[in-house]
Image (tube, helix red, strand yellow):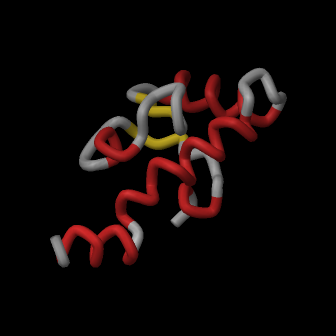
Amino acid sequence: EAMASGDVPIVINKGGQGELVEHGVNGFLWNELDALKEKTLACITNAVDVKELGIKARESIQQFSPEEFFRKLNV
């Protein structure tokens, strides 16, 4: 839901999250707390292009939209 809103995910690299988030492309994955702190600070201080990451997050999550689901179902 956050990605669909254009928010930049900063998520732990476990479970299915690594399948949704491409590190540095549409959000960030982290394995240790120091990386979480670093990426959070980078977003807060605009050390990374948060706007572009948000756009990529929104675009990438569209593969799970209801419209895409039904399009694939009807194929």
Q: How many marks?
A: 0
Query: Which residue: 55% across, 22% down?
Result: 34
Nearest the viewer among 75 and 6 is 75
Nearest the viewer among 62 and 6 is 62
- In the rendered image, which quarter contains the C terminus? bottom left
Q: Is residue 47 left or right of residue 24?
A: right
Task: Reply above or below: 70 against 68.
Answer: below
Query: Which residue: 45% across, 59% down?
Result: 62
Q: Residue furthest front?
A: 75
Query: Which residue: 54% across, 41% down?
Result: 10
> Picture quarter containing residue 48?
top right
Q: Position of residue 38 (x, y in %)?
A: 63, 23
Task: Reply above or below: 13 against 54.
Answer: above
Q: Residue furthest right?
A: 45
Q: Position of residue 53 (x, y in %)?
A: 63, 37
Q: Is residue 15 left or right of residue 4?
A: left
Q: Is residue 46 left or right of residue 30?
A: right
Q: Position of residue 59 (x, y in %)?
A: 53, 50
Query: Which residue: 62% across, 28% down?
Result: 39
> Picture quarter containing residue 37?
top right
Q: Is residue 9 left or right of residue 66?
A: right
